[in-house]
Amino acid sequence: MPGRTLLTTRATSQGFAPAVRGTTVAACVLTAAATAAGAMSLPYMVPGGAAAFFAGPPARARLSSAGFADVVKEVKPAVFAIRVKVVTGDTTAPGERLPRNGMTGAPGRSGGRFVVSQGSGFFISADGYAVTNYHVIKNNRTAEIVTDDNKTYPIKVVGIDPTSDLALLKVDGRDDFTFVEFADASPRIGDWIVAVGNPFGLGGTVTAGIVSAHGRDLNDTHEDLIQIDAPINQGNSGGPTFDLSGRVIGINTMIFSPTGGSVGLAFGVPAARAKAVLAQLKDKGEVHRGWLGAEVQAVSPEIGDSLGLDKASGVIVTDIVPNAPAAVAGIVAGDLIHTVSKRVVNDPHDFTRAFEGIAPGTPVEVTLTRNGEDRTITAIAGRLPGTDQVANVGTIVASQESNIPAADPVQLGLTLLPASAFASTGDHGVIVADVDPNSAAAGRVGTGDVILDVAQRGVSAPEDVFRAVAHARIAGKPSVLMRVKSGKKIQFIAMPVN
């Protein structure tokens, strides 16, 4: 057709990656309730000599005119089904978890005393070392695997890491298991992939698709996941996803599904993270992670304007765990962090990755800005505590009191109460009792939120908030920076004042 150019592309052995790389693809935004933007979790470390753990001749194949059959023939014998018996009444059995939070097989079948759950796993060495998800074997009392040739073996747990949702297993008695290795490089978006697992107890099931995205964050611990569109269901948890060379590019750990079945949104732990975690589990039985005890969020353009920055950059500290290394070193909420151990950080991902390879007890140099002044602070990395060791802030719900103040004098659209009126909040902060739906505050804060700081100064009464906002208006500022606690999450919000 004269005057028109048609762009055509063809699926090849490389999948759709060349087409994705060379064309503009409309982006879809994930709106899962599990997403926790700006939340911080700590990274993994690669100890010296970790590569030797995965050495050996693995199963390997490439895509041919036979489609995925050659790949599947080589790797499928390395994948097994896991059957776990959990004592009824302990805690929630793995198979009872919601599909959006994990995939552990068909809902457990109660046998009076036990609930039976199913999952997947795969061998990473000939002498029986294997991998699955932590949530698959979480509350196990007895567990066994069923290999592709229908043989059953008992398993023992070498080590677990709830943070990455990984577990290292061992099957004794043989040194000739078929095993697979992890990929050295990350797959490209659009590359073909093959998943093998035990969905709904139907062992040895193969599905195929492409890599849909990288770097998905779905909650406080599941960070930087690989997204795939291969059909994944309950029971695929802990199973591998392969590239077309038969290398593992990810370990299936989670799906998003409003129906309970596959809708093309599955997520896996990347190979690089899995290798680092598993090496530590084999060596120590657990994973040691460096930790500062500082929560951060990205600096948006609005926050940058509130801080008077020419360009939004760095991360801003939203909260400090009491007595944590950051607190001991003198880092405070409101500090704008630029680098960690000379590594530039511009978002919570960068901040997390900056700790890769930093062991507990290691000095960490942090460059930051506080009240317009640049500083360098040295902190000693601590060890990441378990989730039960970190204080649970809880959710604050404002009650409808008869002494709610009148509308504020600067038309902010907020009705506020002093936090001291509620014993559960302490004396610091101001509670949002109501939000005018037509005000600039609507959508930024909600009823029950607690305003902790305004313009980087603590507030304890509604008048403190109104006064700080009035000063910002007089100074001609378009917004004022508020530090707000909503449930367990603390973040900075740029509140318009005009």
Image (cartoon, rainbow, N blue to C red):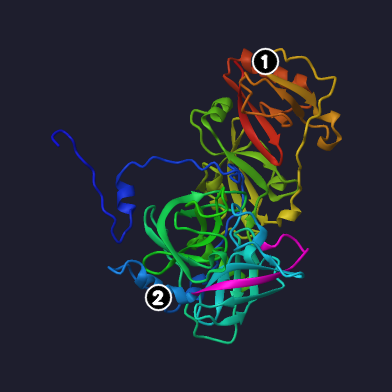
- Asked whether 105 or 486 is in front, the reply is 105
What residue is disc 1 on? 470
Residue 107: tell me if it is visible: yes
Residue 233 lies, in percent from the top left, at 53, 59
The kind of residue on which mark 1 rests is Ala
The kind of residue on which mark 2 rests is Glu
* Magenta span of residues: 79-94
Residue 432 lies, in percent from the top left, at 73, 27
Distance in Å between CA atoms under marks 2 and 1: 70 Å
What residue is disc 2 on? 74
Residue 67, image quadrant: bottom left
Residue 371: tell me if it is visible: no
- Label 1 element class: helix
User: Image point 43% across, 76% down: which residue?
Assistant: 58
- Asked whether 391 or 179 is in front, the reply is 179
Mark 2 vs mark 1: give the one in front. Answer: 2
Q: Quadrant of the N terminus?
A: top left
Dot 2 alpha-carbon crowd within 10 angstroms: few under 14, some 14 to 19, many 20 or more: some
Is residue 80 found inside the magenta-colored segment of the image? Answer: yes
User: Image point 70% across, 29% down: which residue?
Assistant: 453
Q: Quadrant of the C terminus?
A: top right
Residue 462 lies, in percent from the top left, at 77, 21
